[in-house]
Each structure stands twice: as C-alpha cells, then as structure tokens.
Image (spheres, rainbow, N blue to C red):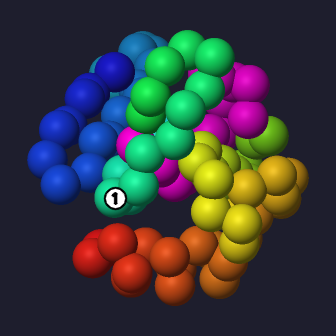
Amino acid sequence: MLHIYSRTSRTIAFRRDENGYRWIGEQEIFEGRKEYMSADGTFKEQICLNYEVEHISGFPLNTLSIVYSGEDKRLAARNELTLSDVLPILKEWGY
C-alpha cells in the first residue's frame, strides 16, 4: 500500500507477483467543510472514491464505488452514487 496525504488522502494498493508489483486498487478521500455527529464521535463530511480490480476492502470489482459520509441531504442515505452526483459537491468544497 502506498499512502499519500495532501489535499486529499489517497491509498494505492499493489500486489507483488513474479514480475514485481502490479496495481490492484485505489481509494481517494475528499473532505468537506461541515461536521457531523455519529456514535463514534464528530467527523468532517467526506466523499470516498474506491476502485478495485482485486478484492481489498469489499467493494465491487472493476466498478467505481462512491461513498458519502455526512448529513448533506443531496447525498446522505443514497446507496449508489455516481460521479455526476458528487462532482458538483466536490466543486463546492473547492476540489
């Protein structure tokens, strides 16, 4: 795993094979401005993009999976978000 912390938080996963390392998945987390309360404490809202070609975290393979955590009514409680759903929000957040 390669972890990169900058404006966003990115994790890139590799698997070692006979030829070296090959890419098997990636996750990028975008943090919003608003905070929300959960049973585990107070957190900033976030949008998390996940793509895996091999099982790493349990997301569907070969599919962009987007998860929102927070209380924004436009995204909260929606199961299958698309890039077109979250791009306007990411733009609002300054990404």
Which residue appears at 62% of the width and 63% of the height?
72
Identify the image quadrant of residue 11: top left
Q: Is residue 95 magenta?
A: no
Q: Is residue 41 above or below residue 91?
A: above
Using the rendered image of the protein, determine whether residue 30 is visible from the camera's viewpoint: no
Q: Position of residue 6 (x, y in %)?
A: 14, 47
Element type at mark 1: strand
Query: Left or right: where does residue 35 sit relative to residue 79?
Result: left
Q: Quadrant of the N terminus?
A: top left
Q: Position of residue 91 (x, y in %)?
A: 39, 82
Q: Position of residue 62 (x, y in %)?
A: 72, 50
What segment carries the magenta color?
A: 44-59
| Three-letter code, disc 1 | Arg
Q: Is residue 33 above or below residue 46?
A: below
Q: Is residue 19 above or below residue 5?
A: above
Front residue of 87 and 93: 93
Q: Position of residue 24 (x, y in %)?
A: 52, 34
Front residue of 14 and 68: 68
Query: Left or right: where does residue 14 sit relative to residue 68?
Result: left
Q: Is residue 58 magenta?
A: yes
Front residue of 65 and 23: 65
Q: Quadrant of the C terminus?
A: bottom left
Which residue appears at 83% of the width and 58% of the height?
78
Assess disc 1: are there few (<14), some (14-19) or many (≥20) residues with their C-alpha within 10 Å of its C-alpha.
Answer: few
Most extreme residue toward the left, as rendered? 6
Using the rendered image of the protein, determine whether residue 21 is visible from the camera's viewpoint: yes
Identify the image quadrant of residue 3: top left
Query: Left or right: where does residue 79 sit relative to residue 57?
Result: right
Which residue appears at 60% of the width and 26% of the height?
38
Which residue was labeled with disc 1? 33
